[in-house]
């Protein structure tokens, strides 16, 4: 450890040079994380928007088909229930006719009247009648009469007794009618059943125009998709802001970790150098102090022994000199021990050790006025912090007394509800020397012990070094 008085300092340059050659610590890729998140989240949001649009379209189509089917079923039932005998009679007659004869066959008068009434409805676009073999026996578009459409899935489903519908969009090619549709149509296939439980005798197909409904649905779809895109964009921006804030927080934490790691490496390198310097100093003190004193004792003992052997009796002067040399050796050993670690820190406590330290520092530096205020009880300071507080105070004061401008040093140690604070004030108006090893060691010791370090300076030139720990 280090003595209080003037001494040779350790040059931290070798360890610092080694540290400067190392690459900086930390996690790379903060901006890469933001870039990856931005791309990934944008792709996910676009995929979600597309999935929502497809889902809405499917739901809308299903609703249009169900609505059109219910309307077509109501129209067909209202029109055909009254003329069902004539309809069945026409289907039987058409089933026996040749396909070439079908275009010339006339509908029974009541059936023709009902179909004319249906075609008069604005929404009805086309009407077809199929016999049980899938041949079109009647159509409002005469080009379709006589065609075999037994492979039509709608016809096949209707022949099993089901009512089925399909939405055909404008400009879509109808393979069964062999033409491109001019409107958005609902095709509804209704089985013609003579009585409940019997086999269908044919199929009635009704085309209704749903242009207005499809247009309204498309407008709603565009509004929903636009609103969804806006909401997703706002969500994307919000998430991006959150990630950017998190990235800045992580970067700040990494910077703090780097500071702690670099401080730990610096103090580790300084400790290695300090250990060698301490060994060199102790060896020098032992050789030049205690060893020389013991040599003097040895010479006095040999001289006294020679006097006794010569019959001259004891030599009181020599014995007195030996006693004085032994006392000097004991004092030097005690000084070495105090410099390594004050025994009062373990025996009397921190407050007594600080008082002793200030007294010794004032004795060694009479040109500096040193005062201390200890507003703590010994039990208020945790055992683990006592040596840290003392070493920080020792390092800070050693750095200050080396400055020729410093004439006053004030030490204050106080406690709060959860904190312990050490304040070192001085009257040096010059900024602190960042390369001072003692001050750097104090700063690093505070950080490594979990404390906080602040430096304030007022307009009058009074500077304050403040260290705070949680108790």
Image (cartoon, rainbow, N blue to C red):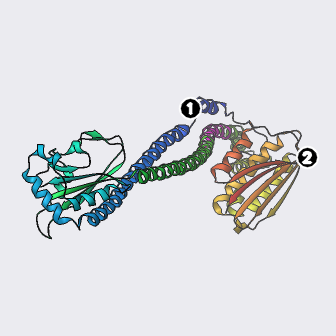
Residue 397 belongs to the span the image colors magenta: no
Above or below, 77 against 98 in this view is below
Task: Tell me if residue 280 is in the magenta stretch.
Answer: yes
Residue farthest to the front?
109
Residue 361: x and y, percent? 82, 49
| The C terminus sits in image quarter | bottom right
Magenta-drawn stretch, dominant element (helix, strand or loop):
helix
Whole-percent x and y of residue 247?
57, 45
How packed mark 2 is, by other alpha carbons closer than 10 Å (few <14, some 14-19, many 20 or more), is few
Q: Is residue 215 visible?
A: yes
Residue beneath the point at 21% across and 57% down: 204
Tell me if residue 415 comes above or below residue 178 in the rendering: below
Left/right placement of residue 183 relative to residue 100 reads right
Query: At which x and y percent is residue 456?
Result: 82, 48
* Residue of label 2: 459
Mark 2 or mark 1: whose residue is earlier in sequence: 1
Which residue is most to the bottom? 196
Q: Residues within 10 Å of mark 1 (few under 14, many from 20)?
A: few
Q: Nearer the viewer, residue 343 or 303?
A: 343
Give, as a single range, the part of the protein colored magenta.
264-282
Q: Is residue 371 left or right of residue 147?
A: right
| Badge 2 element | loop
Location of mark 1 (residue): 23
Which element carries disc 1, helix, strand or loop?
loop
In depth, the one of 377 and 288 nearer the eye is: 377
Q: Which residue lies most toward the right here?
A: 460
Q: Quadrant of residue 287?
A: top right
- Say which of 109 and 304 sits in front: 109
């Amino acid at each position: 450890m280090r003595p209080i008085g003037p001494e040779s300092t350790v040059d931290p340059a070798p360890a610092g040079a080694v540290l400067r050659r190392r690459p900086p610590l930390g996690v790379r890729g903060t901006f890469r994380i933001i870039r990856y998140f931005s791309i990934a989240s944008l792709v996910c949001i676009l995929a979600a928007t597309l999935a929502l649009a497809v889902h809405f379209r499917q739901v809308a189509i299903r609703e249009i088909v169900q609505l059109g089917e219910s309307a077509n079923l109501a129209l067909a039932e209202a029109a055909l229930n009254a003329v069902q005998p004539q309809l069945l009679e026409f289907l039987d007659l058409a089933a026996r006719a040749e396909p070439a004869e079908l275009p010339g066959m006339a509908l029974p008068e009541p059936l023709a009247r009902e179909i004319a009434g249906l075609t008069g409805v604005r929404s009805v676009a086309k009407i077809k009648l199929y016999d049980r073999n899938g041949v079109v026996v009647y159509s409002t578009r005469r080009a379709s009469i006589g065609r075999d459409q037994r492979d039509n899935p709608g016809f096949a489903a209707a022949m099993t007794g089901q009512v089925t519908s399909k939405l055909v969009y404008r400009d879509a090619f109808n393979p069964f009618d062999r033409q491109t549709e001019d409107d958005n149509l609902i095709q509804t296939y209704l089985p013609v059943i003579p009585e409940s439980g019997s086999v269908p005798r044919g199929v009635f197909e009704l085309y209704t125009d749903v242009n207005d409904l499809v247009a309204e649905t498309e407008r709603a779809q565009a509004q929903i998709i636009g609103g969804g895109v806006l909401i997703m964009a706002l969500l994307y921006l919000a998430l991006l802001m959150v990630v950017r804030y998190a990235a800045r927080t992580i970067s700040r934490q990494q910077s703090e970790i780097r500071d702690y790691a670099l401080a730990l490496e610096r103090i580790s390198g300084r400790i290695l150098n300090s250990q060698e310097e301490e060994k060199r100093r102790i060896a020098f003190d032992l050789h030049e102090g205690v060893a020389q004193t013991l040599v003097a004792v040895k010479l006095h003992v040999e001289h006294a022994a020679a006097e006794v052997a010569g019959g001259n009796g004891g030599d009181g002067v020599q014995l007195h000199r030996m006693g004085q040399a032994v006392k000097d050796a004991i004092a030097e050993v005690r000084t070495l021990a105090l410099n390594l670690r004050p025994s009062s820190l373990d025996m009397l406590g921190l407050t007594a050790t600080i008082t002793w330290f200030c007294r010794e520092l004032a004795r060694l530096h009479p040109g500096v006025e040193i005062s201390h205020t200890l507003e703590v009880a010994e039990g208020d300071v945790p055992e683990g912090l006592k040596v840290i507080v003392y070493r920080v105070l020792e390092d800070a004061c050693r750095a200050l007394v080396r400055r020729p401008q410093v004439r006053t040093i004030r030490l204050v140690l106080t406690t709060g509800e959860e904190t312990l604070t050490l304040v070192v004030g001085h009257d040096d108006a010059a900024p602190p020397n960042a390369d001072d090893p003692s001050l750097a060691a104090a700063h690093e010791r505070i950080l490594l012990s979990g404390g906080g370090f602040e430096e304030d300076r007022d307009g009058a030139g009074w500077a304050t070094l403040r260290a705070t720990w949680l108790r």
